[in-house]
Every structure is written in structure tokens, then in C-alpha cells.
Amino acid sequence: MLVAALMLFSYVMGQMSVAASAAPLVRRIAFWRNQPVKLVEEALALVRTRYVTPIEDERELVYGAVDGMMNRLHRPPYNDPYSAFLGASLWQALSATTAGSYAGVGIIIGLDPDRPYPSIAAVFPDSPAEKAHLLENDLIIAVDDHSTQDRPLEEIARMIMGEPGTQVKLTLIRAQANTPIEVNLKRATIEVHSVMDVALKQRSVGYMRVANFGAKTPEEVEKAIKELKADGAKSLVIDLRNNSGGLLEAAVQVADLFIPEGVITVLEQRGEPRKEFYADPSRKKYHLPLVLLVNRKSASASEVLTGALQDYGLATVVGETTFGKGVVEQVQAIGDGEVGIALSIGKYLTPKGHDLNGEGIAPDVSITFEELIASDPDLARLSNDIDALRQGITDESGKLMKLFTERQLAIAEQTASEQAILKEEESPSKEENEPSAA
């Protein structure tokens, strides 16, 4: 042990002496400015030649370095949770044409503002998810026993997708509960519509829910508006709760249904001129009194739409402060095209120049969970009932564990007693062991 300790000390001291004799500060600054990749090359060369066993696939080492680079952007001073390395299997899935090849369970997943797991933003009608009673706001903490913590949404979506008829297991935590539940689902081909639940409500209020922004969303929104107006709608609610975003162009085109003219959003990128997206004055506009319903999971493209209509005074925003994801993500292949990265390259601004990232959009009419609990007797009573049930479960769990430990002790005591009896039966008596007197 002493020899090993002295050898280790000698090695560390040797490293310290090497560091002390390093190049001057100016040379080190030049190195980091001009040849940062040299450090990775040196480390790779050391691992390649000195590691205890031969390296089977050097690409995996390089991929790990890139993954570490992307993960470093998640921490201060960058605080960017969206940039990510896309490994070979994920990149191939993202790059493949999904028509006829992939299926899912019929959910849209989104970001959770409080926890590092995705939550269910929407459940499609008649889907495997609906038949299995999955609910909006359920947290997905694992897919086929692989944790989803801090993984990019695109990666988690591909983990859930697969061939029609195959099985996938989701581990969920339901809102207001702490115990995980496991659900096995059979994948099926899903017909996706981003506009859902179109209906004429009381007092001639038209309602539609926009679950995400896809290529067909503007067309679906305009179709729903026409149907609702034909049914007698005098005002309109667009529900953007849990809408985690989608295509920027789709959000801009939906905003263009209402904004007569002017800037809809501004895109800022490093080293690039500002790019402004404008409303088309020549297209048909709709002038219904408009309410946008949002919550803390309304993000990205849904915030672009909300910010634009709020800035122009064309919509009243009701609900909670939105998520605050106003970044532009670029997804591209790197190296030989077998892998890729998702990189935040810019940010969105509202027409009045408000930065969407980090802060979110404050509603004109605030409706938070705590505010409703305090003001609505039915909700307050239900919340109290849930608290009582949760306390009851905690109490019963405590009794269960106490009884379990008592049963363990009882079995241990019984086993010890049985062993003592067995020993007595197997051992000769004391009298038999004593020598006879001569």
C-alpha cells in the first residue's frame, strides 16, 4: 500500500511539474483561440494508445466528446436545455421517412416547466393512449425502462414510436400523485390533426384547441373558424394550453389570419441580420373577438402566436404565464452524416421587441391553480379530498411497512428457534460426552 501511495504521489507531482513548466500565458491563449480541437485529439491519442484495453470503436469516444460539449451548454452561463447531440439511432430515425414505417401511441409530448421529464400535452381520440386512459399532464419518466430525464423531446418521441403492432411500455407519474404507474401500449398508425375539439359553446362562443403547430395547422384553423362562424359564433377561444410549439411558419400563418399588416415576429441570430416575418395585407382576415387560453406549458411557436396577437391588441390572453422558450433550433448532420446535433442558433422577439426566452408571456387575465383553489369551492373541496386521500395513503403505507418489519422479525425469531431445536437434537447430551470414571 505504501509503495502504491508513493507511486501515485510521484505521478501527481510529476504532472504538477509538467504543468509548472508549461508554455507562457500568451501561448496558452493562442492555443484555446486557434486550436481547441487539439485538446480532444491529444486525449483521443492517449486513450487510443494507453488505455488498459484496445478501443473497439473510436467513433463512440468522439461522439461522447460531442455529447459532453452539448451537455455543457445546459449549465451556466448558457442555461440552454435544448441543444443536444443526436446519436446514430436517433439521427437515423429523425432522418427517415416515417410514412408507412413508424407508428405511435397517439400522444403529443411537451416540456414540463418544473421537472426534467416530458409531459403528455395531448391525447388523440380513439388512439392506444386514450384507450389505455392516459391523461394530459401525465409525466413520462421512462420508456421501456429507459429514463427520459433531461432527454430531448425528439429523442423521447422516437423512443415511443416504432413499427405498428409492436409494444412499448411507458412509466408515468400522474398529476397530484407520487407513485409511478406502468402502462403497456400497442403502437398503431396515428392520423395526426393539430386542431381538435372544435365546438360552439354557450353564449355563441366558438372554441378550438390547437395541440401543436404543423404544416396543416393554418389550413385547419381557418377551416374551423369558417365552420364556427357558420354555426353562429360571435367570439372565439383558441386553446393553446400544453402546446409546446412546432413549425414557426405555421404559427406565423395562423397569426396572419388576424393581423392586418405589420411584423408578426422577429428572428435574431448571431452574425446574421434580423429577419422579420410580416403579415400579408392581401389575404382574408378574421375579426372575431379573440381569447387565447395558455398555461405554463405553452411554449415556442405557441408563444410566437400569443405574443404577436397580444402586442397588436387583437387577443386577450387568459391563463398562466407561458413557458418562455423563444429559441431557434437548428438540426443538422455532422461528420459523415451518421449523427447530428440540435443547436440553439437564435431567438424570437414579439412585434414590440419582447424577448420570449426565459420570461414567457404574462396573461392579461391570470387564472392559476392556486387562485382557482382559493376562489372556487368545488375545486377547494376536491383538493382537500385529494390531500386527505394522500395523507391516508401515507398513513396506511406506514402501517404496511411497520407490519412488514414485524413479520420479518417474527420469521427471523422462528428460524433461530428452529435452528436451536435442531442443534439440540443433533448434538450428543452432556452426559454422553463426559468420560466414565475408572
Image: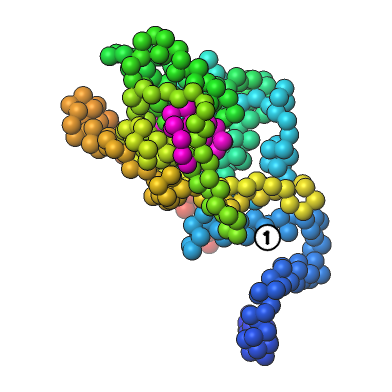
Q: Residue at x 42, y 9 (%)?
A: 230
Q: Quadrant of the N terminus?
A: bottom right
Q: Residue at x 53, y 45 (%)?
A: 276
Residue at the spot of label 1: 65
5 relative to 272, above or below: below
Q: Residue at x 64, y 20 (%)?
A: 189
Residue 436 percent across, percent down from the top left: 52, 58
Residue 90 percent across, percent down from the top left: 68, 41
| 58 inside magenta stretch | no
Observer able to see residue 123: no
Q: Secondary structure at mark 1?
A: helix
Observer able to see residue 214: yes
Q: Mark 1 belongs to which amino acid?
A: Ala
179 relative to 114, above or below: above
Answer left or right for 207 relative to 328. Answer: left
Answer left or right for 259 relative to 344. Answer: left
Q: Residue at x 62, y 86 (%)?
A: 25
The one nearer the camera, 110 or 12, is 110
Magenta-colored span: 241-263
